[in-house]
Amino acid sequence: MSFTILKKHELVPTIHQMEITAPRVAKKAMPGQFVILRINERGERIPLTIADFDVQAGTITLIFQEIGKTTCQLASLAAGGLIADVTGPLGTPSTIGKFGTVVCVGGGVGIAPIFPIARALLEAGNRVISIIGARSADILFWEERMDAASSELHITTDDGTKGHHGFVTEVVQNLLERGKQGAHSEPGEPDGHNGQIDRVIAIGPPVMMRAVAGVTKPFGVKTVVSLNPIMVDGTGMCGACRVLVGGETKFACVDGPEFDAHEVDFTLLMSRLAMYLPEEKEAIDCKATAELAAGRQ
Ligand code: FES
């Protein structure tokens, strides 16, 4: 059985949005879960977070960045094209509860997976303060969706072309400090009205998630990150996605992908992610890859 690409477009340079017919996946999908797809029978298996899903239409939305051979091949496909396998939903869903005020941080392509989580947290009655960041305004996406899924939205760009000139961590720090002051001056107010931050969830490049964890730790605010290690089977059998959390080995595909940010060994995560970089570099000529995939070589 193949999966049909209904819509596909380049959101911003090198980041693509793809809507696929996958009724069984859409029916069971929950925020925080992912799929593993293979473009063709001989293709590599890659994990992609489910950025949105529509049970009625039987579709899922995936966002991906051209970072390796397979994502470049995927980028070369158009609406009407077929994908050999889409397995999922996989992983443990995000914990959605009524926490009070939750800060949702999405960095770069991490804006896509943070969206359904922010929306579910807002629907669950939380005050959701979202922060989305990118290197520059021209690669920032889903601002309107994030605005609709949040009580308050902050934008940051590294180069200052939109919103706060700097990193998401600076806004997180400001919010935590504001919350601390508010909590002290107005201790009787209910959660969400005194600025107190009750939970932070951050998704983005590992270096960003590590920085957010470093900022929130002194404030003692529960912080969750969604890890993106290399995955192969997605079912806890191969061990490719192993991460160290609180000194214990965990498999991100079944035990995660979300973990307590203050317990994650980010150094190990980053060194494991760098393991195949030489091979990816060799395969990363996207134009040649796309031409090969289309048989135009
Ligand atoms: S991807 Fe194989 S154990 Fe997680």
Image: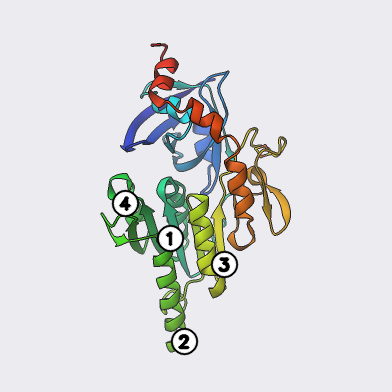
Callout 4 amino acid = Glu
Q: Are marks 2 and 3 in contact (CB under 8 Å)?
A: no
Secondary structure under tag 3 reads loop
Could you tell me residue 289's position as x and y percent?
Answer: 43, 21
Where is the C terminus found, in terms of image quarters? top left
Residue named by callout 1: 122
Rendering quadrant holding ligand 1: top right
Which label lies toward us, 4 or 1? 4
Residue at image location 58% in from the left, 60% down from the top: 261
**Furthest-left residue in view?**
161
Look at the picture and state if 258 lies above or below 165: above
Q: Are marks 2 and 4 in contact (CB under 8 Å)?
A: no
Q: Which mark is residue 184?
A: 2
Which one is nearer the viewer's eye here, 213 or 283? 283
Three-letter amino acid code of the residue under disc 1: Leu
Please report contact status of discs 3 and 1: CB closer than 8 Å, yes or no: no
The mark that comes first in sequence, 4 or 1, is 1
Q: Which residue is mark 4?
A: 143
Give the distance between the C-alpha atoms of the residues marked 3 and 4, in whole angstroms.
26 Å
Crowding at label 2, few (<14), some or many (≥20) Cα neighbours within 10 Å? few
Which residue matches tag 3?
A: 222
Q: Which badge, 3 or 1, comes first in the chain's sequence?
A: 1
Question: Within 10 Å of the Cα at label 4, are there few (<14), some (14-19), or many (20+) other Cα atoms?
Answer: some
**Foreground of the two, 132 or 35:** 132
Q: Residue 159 occupies which quadrant of the picture?
A: bottom left
